[in-house]
Image (spheres, rainbow, N blue to C red):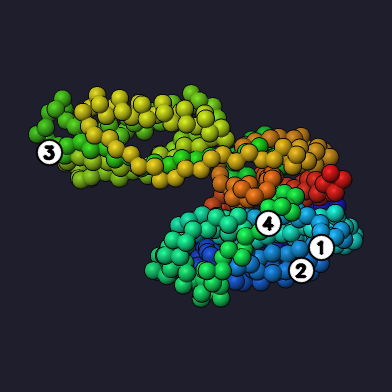
Amino acid sequence: MGEFAELAIQVMARCETLGTLSQNPSCLDRRYLTEQHRLANQLASGWMIEAGMTTWQDAVGNIWGRYTSSVPNAPRLILGSHLDTVPNGGKYDGMLGVVAAISLVAMFDGTQTKFPFHIDIVGFCDEEGTRFGTTLLGSRALTGKWEDQWRFLKDENGISLEQAMANFGLNFDAVNSAAIARTDILGYLELHIEQGPVLEQENLPVGVVSAIAGARRFNFTVEGMAGHAGTVPMSMRKDALCASAEMLLAVENISLQRPGVVATVGKIENAPNGVNVISGRTRFSLDIRSEDDNLRDSVLAEILQKFDEIAQRRQLTLSREQTHSAPAVHCDEYLKKALVRGVEESEIAPRVLASGAGHDAMAMADICPVAMLFTRCKGGISHHPAESITHDDVAASLSVLYKTISKLQHA
């Protein structure tokens, strides 16, 4: 990794610099269409120009750079990730994939290495969805999947998406011009921190992603009967909170027995929520994910059946609302194998693993082949200031991408 060690130092330093651009002075918080978004784009654009690229900002606010091919009518290989963060986020989620790609291109430019395809780097403007509550705005604009009603989405200050775009110098009605042609894309490669503990547990610097898990989310409402905690006999109660507790444990128990699925209840509300009142109504969420949609849905069916049994036995009313559904996205076999070969040529044991988190690659899969490389992160911690990676692991990631891209020219 020696030849990539110096490059890794540059990548880490640039992530630190981007980490100073925050709308909140006490933590890293950089959201879509803010002044900090503008500054991040300017910074990335400057680095792209230094790397020998031409740059532009598209109609939705993504920042782009192109390392031009010498071949006429060449296809494009797109590298990138996102430059926005969650509130109180870390310095590497998203940013690593953009900054590392720029440094790699600078290396190609330094040796005057040319390819039979353009290398386009994109810094997506909104992956997290933090400001307007809708994720993947940047990458979905590329795929032509923006919805007209999004113009009315509002942030916590009541500013609409349409107005925020106008304030930024963009026009909501021009977003369609950000869409890109499907016909000339070789593929999309995204480097990202793992956001999980598997690579660290197996003492590996990088891993190749097999698929991005598909998720379904629900809100459940359990209706019982509120009552006095001292006067209603235990045998006569319709306690919504006790029923919910049984349901929550059923989610855990069923999922533990079905490898390849993760299911989480992360939010619960209780009413009347008094210390001396039997619970009359509870609401709770369910998030269930797998890289196998059929497996996920069969486990979900088992969970729902168990919920109905519990509600019926306890003589309670159960209702549900689905709030999100996204299919799993499988990485392109050719690009995935190219990354595995890059890992092996970097003298690292190849490990293929699924991503439980969503990424811009999910949206990009609508228009082109996608693949992802994970970099090990300390403790699997992400979306938190404690997000941490090492120079050595960044050097390993750069090596894998360098070898992967270099071989693609012989495809």
- Asked if the residue at tag 4 contacts the one at tag 1, i.e. Cβ–Cβ closer than 8 Å, the answer is no
Residue 311, given in percent of the width and then of the height, sits at 27, 29
Q: Amino acid at mark 3?
A: His
Disc 2 crowd rating (10 Å Cα; few below 14, some 14-19, many 20+) is some
Which residue in the structure is indicated by mark 3? 228
Residue 397, given in percent of the width and then of the height, sits at 75, 48
Q: Identify the secondary structure beneath mark 2.
A: strand
Q: Report the front residue among 145 and 385.
A: 145
Which residue in the structure is indicated by mark 2? 54
Which residue in the structure is indicated by mark 1? 68
Q: Nearer the viewer, mark 1 or mark 3?
A: 1
Q: Report the front residue among 408 and 182.
A: 182
- Asked if the residue at tag 2 contacts the one at tag 1, i.e. Cβ–Cβ closer than 8 Å, the answer is yes
Left or right of 154: which side holds 101?
right
Residue 188, given in percent of the width and then of the height, sits at 70, 50
Disc 4 crowd rating (10 Å Cα; few below 14, some 14-19, many 20+) is few
